[in-house]
Image (tube, rainbow, N blue to C red):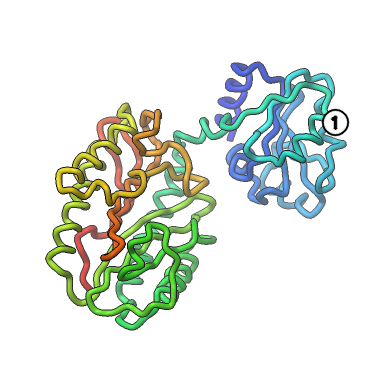
Amino acid sequence: MNQRMDKLAEALKDLGLQAFMVNKPENIRYLSGFTGGSDASLLISSKGKFIFADPRYFQQVQMECPDWKLIAEKPGGHDRLVKQCAGFKKIGFESHAITHQHYAELERLLPGRLVAHSDVVEKLRLVKDEYELEKLREAARIGDEVFNEICSMVTLGMTEKEIASQIDYQIRRLGCEKESFDTIAVGGPNAALPHGKPGSRRLKSGDMLTLDFGGFFQGYAGDMTRTIVFRKASAKLHTRYDLLLQAQNKALSMVRAGISCREIDQAVRDHLKNYDLDTYFLHSTGHGVGLEIHESPRISVHSDHVLAENMVITIEPGIYFSDWGGIRIEDMAIVKNGGCEVITRSDKNLIII
């Protein structure tokens, strides 16, 4: 935590800020260790580092943030915050983490000029430290174990909802505190929806089933996708699956420190275009993963990010056909100098159950 605070202090100095307020739950956790979500806020200034919370969280704050000064503040109150900001002329705040009403109240009450920033802490979170990498590896490992469990239990006639509920159960049984996002388990024509919701449709022979899921392990998200097929796979499915897998492996082979995210995404699109599949690729190639399931860097043609060592990303191309279904393959990877460490280990060959 001390190294994180040192980096933040440097960033605030460069921005000319005398104080900085933190309200985004993931950023609060990253800087202080407090896991109570939005029920607290931080103030970092030349006077020290303060965490504001109401009495319900005093014991938790004292356990998780022993080196932060705890200040009691009623929910929605600002009196103690205003007192700690006395004398500051430029006070930074997270513009993406508070409401307009909250901002208006702060502007009225605080003595200094409020300066909006949206990514001060997020920039620090881009590159993971070893503690974070350990949590992300474990989140990925649990995902692999969940996938193995599901492959051993899914049968014809099960509904998408039944499969999704089994995934959610296994995520928690195997050690995660909750799902990283709403589990996607969609089969047959429903697999044409990249973010389809599990429904009551029962799976039948020849159906593809796309499983996109993950769990938070000690605050850090896992994310993986596999597409499997029941009983029989058509020649068309084999061909399309193999071409998509080639695109995904191509992208993974390019991941290394120093490469632009745009270049990776474009390579996937170029590969798919060679087989007239590019127009069926409806999203970007991947995204960063950490305390949030979707965070920077974005692996997209619209991204300006360049990968750096120990960023953690997903590579997840997919192709979707409204009259047929869809396929997506996703792995998590840690960026390294000269390559990457793929931390999702589940088999990527087409699995027929």
- The residue identified by callout 1 is 109
Q: Is residue 241 above or below residue 50?
A: below
Q: Residue furthest front?
A: 323
Q: Quadrant of the N terminus?
A: top right
Q: Where does the C terminus fall, quadrant-wise?
A: bottom left
Q: Position of residue 334 (x, y in %)?
A: 35, 41
x 36%, y 67%: residue? 190
Q: Nearer the viewer, residue 229 or 70?
A: 229
Numbered marks: total: 1
Which corner quadrant of the image does residue 207 belong to? bottom left
Which element type, helix, strand or loop, lies under badge 1? helix
Give whichever of 85, 161 is nearer the camera: 161
Q: Position of residue 274 (x, y in %)?
A: 15, 43
Of 165 and 13, which appears nearest the observer? 165
* Disc 1 residue type (three-letter): Leu
Report which quarter residue 352 is drawn in: bottom left
In the rendering, at what x and y percent does residue 308 appear? 37, 30
Q: Is residue 225 left or right of residue 290?
A: left
- The answer to whether residue 351 is left or right of residue 221 is left
Q: Residue at x 49, y 57 (%)?
A: 181
Instruction: Say above or below: 289 vs 241.
Output: above
Question: How busy is the neighbourhood of tag 1: few (under 14 within 10 Å), some, or many (20 plus)?
Answer: some
Using residue 31 as the reference point, say whether residue 82 is left or right of it: right
Which residue is painted at 40% across and 54% down in the image?
Answer: 223
Which quadrant of the figure has residue 227? Answer: bottom left
Q: Position of residue 68 (x, y in %)?
A: 72, 37
Q: Residue furthest bottom?
A: 157
